[in-house]
Amino acid sequence: MALYLKILQFKEFLEEILKILYYYKGRVVFSLSGVALGILSICVIITTIDGANKKAYEIFEALGPDSIMIFSGSERQRMARERVITLTHIDAESIEKINGIYDITKTFPVRGLTLRYRDRKWQTNVIGATENYFSSYSWKLYLGTVFKKEDLENLESVCVIGFKVYDELFKGEDAIGKTIQIGKLPTKVIGVLEEKGGAAGGPNIDDRVIMPLSTVVSKLSNEKRYLGAIRVKTSRDVDATIEDIKAVLRKNHGIIGEQDDFTIRSSRDILQFMSVISGSLFLFLGTASIVALVVSGFVLANLFYLTIQERKKDIGIRRAYGASRRGILLSFLFESVFITFLGGIIGIILSLLLQGVFEKLFDIPMKFSFKVVVFALLFSCLTGTISGFKPALKASKIEPIEAIRG
Amino acid sequence: MITLKGIKKSYFIGERELPILKGIDLTIQSGELVILMGVSGSGKTTLMNIIGLLDKQTEGEYFFMDRNVDGLDDETLAVLRNEHIGFVFQQFFLLPYLNAIENVLIPIVYSKKNIKHPREKAKQLLARFGLSDRIHNKPSQLSGGEQQRVAIARALINDPDLILADEPTGALDSKTGNEIMELFRMLNNEGKTIIVVTHDPKLAQFGKRLIRIEDGIISEDTTV
């Protein structure tokens, strides 16, 4: 290749290749679009997975690595979205006594309540929670303040509303100190939560109202025995603590050898869940992109074979004028890689343009990085090399005299 | 410049041997203008291909520029062709997607020689052959004579020692053909060694030396 490195020669060489590509533009367009599609999907995979991972780590960070959540209902029931309430205040007390647990948040949800403010209506879930709810979820406030221990003790009718609720009821107006109707209960809005945005496919976490647990169980639901979920933080090993919690709950609920009627989750499970999501995305998009690349590689190789037949004379002349076999091989290979490289660039540009659309469609933030560009270009060059090699080899084996005579 | 000793060339069709050249002894000095004449099937094109390092003899020795070319590898032969030989073909063989000047520059792409300002040089060559206003034309926009002149410019761009022309007038009318031959004569007067291969007896008058090939051997070798 040192032969071609002289700048002028390379410029001539490049110009020639551009002219050749222009001359055979029909075929080039076919190959280009195939490669571009393949690279597009590769870019989408990588950016999506990067985005999903970033999101997962954000959640992990927000929850804190030492958090454990305990829900009512078995794993199977939760999967089937059956709502069973099994956790009790007594359970919470027992859990609190477990060694290493230093923070316990109790919640009880009331679903499908209608909120009213002036003539506006909105239906949402109200979560009764202990005052540490906000700090343990690291959920910051957009406006106002959160409720305190005294509010729980005094059964105050106050609430902190999610951003979505704020948007629907107040449409950007000042909400702090205003009274809204929750079901039949007039409640004072004291705070608005910061917007978190939806996670992949899940419910909108900004669409909720948080109230003191005691107020909810006495004034909204009249359910004094049960809890919806308990969330704890531990200073000990998470897995060991989970075992202790399981033991306590099984004892309290009288479960021996049957299926648990509760579910325990740690932040680790969330990471696992996200990796399952990105895994299935990877499988689906990965297959699609590899199919696209392989097909475009085949198309490229076949079109190249045809061109070589047509360019036999071309090759003969070049050989007569000083091109060696290796020179012919390299120039054909270069031509093929050039096409796929171009296809790769088009694919990258397309994926940048479509990034916004994909984000809306899959609700997963895409993280475009330098790594993606390098990876995409690498893959496109690889396609060019593999699919161009055999035709280029064939071209290099053409004898100048047979080419000129033919 | 060129010495051929007992050159034989055979093609094999299955088991059958088909001798094309049956023992050629020939020396061509620098500065000669040779017309290599023979009817089709006489072996003249095969001989030209061997001289032009495009084909290899079956037997005998070939010295090109005082160097035995037997057993040289493809890479070395390519460099020798590039640096020392300029080819001109009957069908011109210009590349359809390149314009006149780009066609002239083809050998430069493969050249290890340090040709200064090749683009300027190509322009000068084309201007010399009366093609100043055709520089950016594609081959399809040129007449036969013009295409052949572009091809000759291409043969000259790399300052070769030898020009090998295979039936250079075969696809042209006789007036244009004569012009091309005059051009070769002019180049020869400037010191280029030229070998023109043809079947056309009318071209004999343009050479300084006439070599006739019949049935694979040299039957006549006269210097004018």
Image (spheres, grey):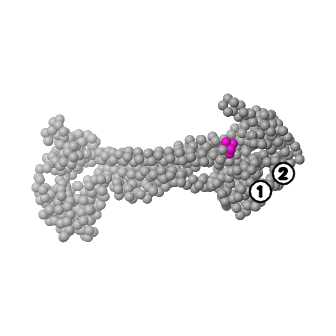
Q: Residue at the location (68% across, 51% down)?
A: B93
Q: Residues within 10 Å of mark 1 (few under 14, many from 20)?
A: some
Amino acid under disc 1: Thr
- Looking at the image, can residue B115 be seen? no
Give the percent coordinates (x, y) of residue B17.
Answer: 71, 31
Q: Which image quarter: residue A220?
A: bottom left
Which residue is labeled 2 in the image? Answer: B206
Stretch in magenta: A400-405
Name the foreground residue: A143 vs A123. A123
Which residue is at a point 60% across and 45% down the rendered structure image? Answer: A309
Pick the front one: A53 or B164:
B164
Q: Is residue A148 above or below residue A90?
A: below
Chain containing the residue with disc 1: B
* Side of A31 where B177 appears, left or right: right
> What numbered label is drawn on residue B176?
1
Q: Quadrant of residue A125?
A: bottom left
Mark 2 lies on a secondary structure that is: helix
Assign a secondary structure to mark 1: helix
Q: Residue furthest right?
A: B224
Total residue callouts = 2
Left or right of B114? Residue A266 is left
The residue positioned farthest toward the top in the image shown: B15
> Disc 1 to disc 2, how far (Cα)?
14 Å
Quadrant of the snapshot with the C terminus of chain A: top right
Based on the picture, tell me whether residue A402 belongs to the magenta stretch: yes
Residue A308: where, in percent of width, then height? 59, 46
Q: Position of residue A128 (x, y in %)?
A: 18, 56
